[in-house]
Image (cartoon, grey):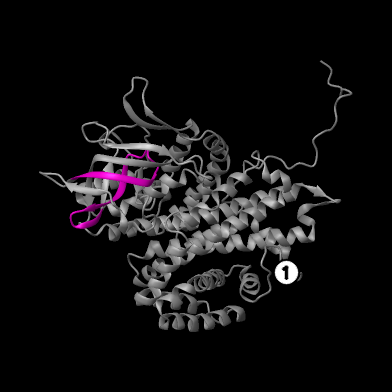
Amino acid sequence: MSSEPSSYDTHEVTNQPPDFAPYDPWACDAALREAVAREGAEAFATHLQAYARIAGDALYRQGWDAHRDKPRLRTHDRFGARIDVVEFHPAYHEIMRTAIAHGVAGLSWAPQAWPAQAVAQPAQGAHVARAALSFLHHQVEPGSSCPLTMTHAAVPALRRASALSVWADKAAAPAYDPRDVPMADKAGVTLGMGMTEKQGGSDVRSNRTTATPLPGGDAYSLVGHKWFFSAPMSDGFLVLAQAPGGLSCFLMPRRLADGERNAFRIMRLKDKLGDWSNASSEVEFVGARAWRIGEEGRGIAVILDMVMLTRLDCMLGSAAEMRMALLQALHHCRHRIAFGHRLVEQPLMRNVLADLALESEAATAFALRVAGAVDRAAQDPREAGFARIATAIGKYWICKRAPAFVNEAQECLGGAGYVEESLMPRLYRQAPLNSIWEGSGNIQCLDVLRAVQREPACLDALRDELAQAGGRDLHYDALVAALADDVESLRASDAVAAQAGARLLVERLALALQAATLLRGDSPLAADFCRSRLGGAHGAAYGTLPATFDFERCLARADDTGR
């Protein structure tokens, strides 16, 4: 056949960017590398670098299939027997297997399982390293982050009950086994959770699911429903239910020790805006067997350890989505020519991209700062207090910023960013999730109010954190001084006035903490962040930095690999 163009050829493909993958999300991210070292996890750098290369190639490609072919629920087999099986694309299982094998779920709790680290004190920095793994993973496949996060976060709760410690050990193990078999037959397990019900949402105290003690042991029978039951093919689930002594936390296995299916039914999978590779469901408990964790009536206290860790992952996930959206925009603009110049050379586009890069670095640095506080909390009461309040502040602000950020990055691609062959629509659908999951914005702000008003250790830690960055920037110092007055005014206000002003206060605290993290980390963008976000040299939209801003420095730092 002739290779000559026919008379019907109308165009040749030019002025299009090359494929994005493979890319190295560790090598191109100076802010992440610096944060990992600053927060005490530099010993894990080789492991993080290795996982980044996998994430930026194989996992990135597998993510397309995992999202394109959504999970499907099969309630019955062909003979009419109830089976309640959720089927996933094989790529999903490969993603989960790779992530768990590299510690995205378990590194915090069992760093010795990754002996190649040669860490003198294996536990030191493990939470930070695991947070960085989650950040790298979420960039390329956010849906699987849900079961990975819940499995990671369930371990402290499970360790509260000695009889359930084997579940904790297997949740932390570097082994993924998707078979629907009893826990005892597996080297590793995954965990989901069921907290909210139709009538309650975030108000879990209104839960109506009942837990009735069974004779002869610690088992209970659960009857009720869950409106959001995450990752329903997990091996076990942390569930809240009303026991005789009040709202309590339980571990409910999918399969009982004798191999029988536990007595719960998956009613349907949620048809969600995004997060398509992950299954979320509604379920009914019809006498499901479960084992109590902690005392009766103390379910919320038990679950708080888990919630704090999942909220940290919400911060990390939103920061990761920002990072990926920025990289997609940079990649397009560095290869696309318009009006005789590459887009990245156009002054207004440079303003937009630099502004996004500034926001992304602040989100990354602050999320890793909170991970460092979590890592040190067990030995340092000051860090524990800071982790408590900063998690809620960061969860509110970073997750709130992600949707507008992703949309701005999407706009950099023009119409190409609005079609499904681009990654941007998937990112845009994913972006609102973290601000809703694990407590919406108002819940986070109320949590900050509670800490400021009732938990002196949290307030002292917050003040100390802000003070340590003082004297380095005039805009920052002015904001911190104003915040001191604002906090005292809030503490003296009645409940109505305090709640009405909570969002503005938390936003200002978040900006101050981001600035403090950049200043103390000697980020080359710290002064620019303070000038634009704190000093009024910025508009309401991205791309409104002053014309005197050093755009080149910011863009070079955002991705210095020359792709």
Q: Which residues are magenta?
A: 220-248
Q: Residue at x 24, y 49 (%)?
A: 210
* Vertical order, 13 against 475 (above or below): above
- Where residue 296 appears, as percent x and y from the top left, is 20, 56
* Vertical order, 78 against 309 (above or below): above
Q: Give the image quarter of residue 420.
A: top right
On the picture, is 428 further left or further right than 389? right
Q: Give the image quarter of residue 457.
A: bottom left
Q: Residue at x 48, y 82 (%)?
A: 484
What secondary structure predominates along the stretch shown in magenta?
strand
Residue located farthest toward the top when viewing the structure as drawn: 1
On the picture, is 155 further left or further right than 412? left
Three-letter amino acid code at the position of disc 1: Phe
Verify whether residue 14 appears in magenta: no
Q: Residue at x 59, y 60 (%)?
A: 360
- Where residue 218 appears, as percent x and y from the top left, is 16, 47
Residue 560 visible in the displayed image: no
Q: Mark 1 highlights which residue?
A: 549
Residue located farthest toward the right when viewing the structure as drawn: 7
35 and 299: which is toward the camera = 299
Residue 525 visible in the displayed image: yes
Q: Residue at x 82, y 50 (%)?
A: 338
494 and 321: which is toward the camera = 494
